[in-house]
Image: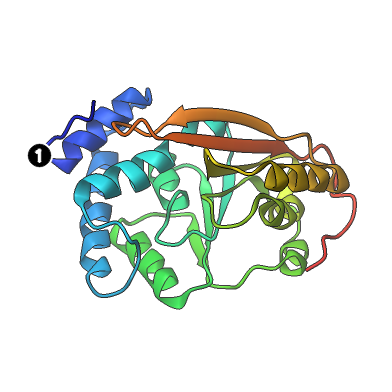
């Protein structure tokens, strides 16, 4: 049964608790400001199709925070196809000591990210307003402990982008809906073998209050990428 709270920040607090997270008052204040600015900007440009505070808190903020347990002690993270900052900017708020790079090709969304970084006074976080290709990812070289994405690419596409950016032992993590096709999963497993990535691990969780299943897929770079990926 779904529980409805009048205050979306109550939902955020309850949801963080359900995830076993201990966020500080400063972090909750930052997330509250983030939500307010997201709604304000969304009235003018299309940052998200979600319209209610409740949906934004559950489907964007809490769904991003659900990735925290998978980050380990990562010191650096890249979020590919970050959009309005989910999950990368939320993870930065929750882990302020972590260096974060948000990769977003759409100019208006990149501008929103730059604005939020300034408003929230975040440090060691930058926006790369580029269309990322495997060749460009290869040219950046290995520099991140974790590369994440929130359903912005097919699994195989994501792995081609993430692998050359990972440090040895680094992790690629993405979130998919429960209806992931066997064909997409098979293609991704093949890519893992060709790029020197470990086999994909899968773990499910349910969206707070909704009960909607999510699937986290992750893999680890075993050594150097075996060959440059093709665009």
Q: Residue 159 placed where, x, y %?
A: 71, 51
Residue drawn 23% across and 25% down?
1
Label 1 secondary element? loop
**Within 10 Å of the Cα at label 1, are there few (<14), some (14-19), or many (20+) other Cα atoms?**
few
Of the pair 146 and 19, the residue shown nearer to us: 19
Q: Residue 125 placed where, x, y %?
A: 48, 56
In terms of image quadrants, where is residue 203?
A: top right
Q: Is 159 left or right of 202, judged from the image as shown?
A: right
Of the pair 193 and 27, the residue shown nearer to us: 193
Residue drawn 38% across and 34% down?
207
For the rendered model, the colour scheme is: rainbow
In the displayed structure, 55 sits above or below 44; it is: above
Q: Residue 185 placed where, x, y %?
A: 70, 42
Disc 1: which residue: 6
* Image quadrant occupied by the C terminus: bottom right
In the displayed structure, 210 sits above or below 176; it is: above
Q: Is 9 left or right of 176, judged from the image as shown?
A: left
In the displayed structure, 141 sits above or below 32; it is: below
In the displayed structure, 44 sits above or below 89; it is: below
Q: Residue furthest right?
A: 226
In terms of image quadrants, where is residue 212?
A: top left
In terms of image quadrants, where is residue 198?
A: top right
Q: Residue 181 placed where, x, y %?
A: 64, 44
Total numbered labels: 1
Of the pair 6 and 127, the residue shown nearer to us: 6
Residue drawn 42% across and 56% down?
85
Of the pair 164 and 118, the residue shown nearer to us: 164
């Amino acid at each position: 049964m779904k529980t409805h709270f009048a205050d979306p920040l109550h939902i955020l607090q309850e949801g963080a608790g359900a995830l076993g997270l201990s966020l500080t008052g400063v972090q909750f204040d930052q997330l509250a400001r983030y939500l307010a600015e997201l709604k304000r900007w969304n009235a003018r440009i299309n940052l998200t199709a979600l319209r209610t505070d409740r949906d934004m808190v559950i489907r964007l903020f809490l769904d991003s925070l659900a990735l925290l347990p998978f980050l380990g002690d990562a010191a650096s993270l890249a979020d590919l196809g970050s959009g309005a900052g989910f999950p990368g900017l939320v993870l930065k708020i929750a882990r302020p000591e972590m260096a974060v790079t948000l990769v977003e090709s759409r100019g208006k969304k990149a501008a929103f990210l730059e604005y939020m970084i300034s408003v929230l006074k975040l440090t060691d976080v930058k926006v790369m307003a580029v269309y990322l290709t495997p060749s460009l990812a290869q040219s950046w070289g290995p520099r991140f402990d974790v590369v994440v994405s929130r359903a912005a690419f097919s699994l195989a596409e994501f792995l081609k982008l993430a692998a050359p950016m990972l440090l040895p032992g680094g992790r690629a993590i993405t979130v998919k809906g429960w209806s992931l096709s066997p064909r997409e999963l098979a293609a991704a497993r093949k890519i893992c073998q060709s790029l020197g990535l470990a086999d994909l691990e899968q773990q499910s969780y349910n969206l707070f209050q909704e009960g909607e299943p999510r699937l986290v897929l992750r893999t680890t770079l075993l050594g150097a990428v075996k060959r440059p990926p093709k665009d």
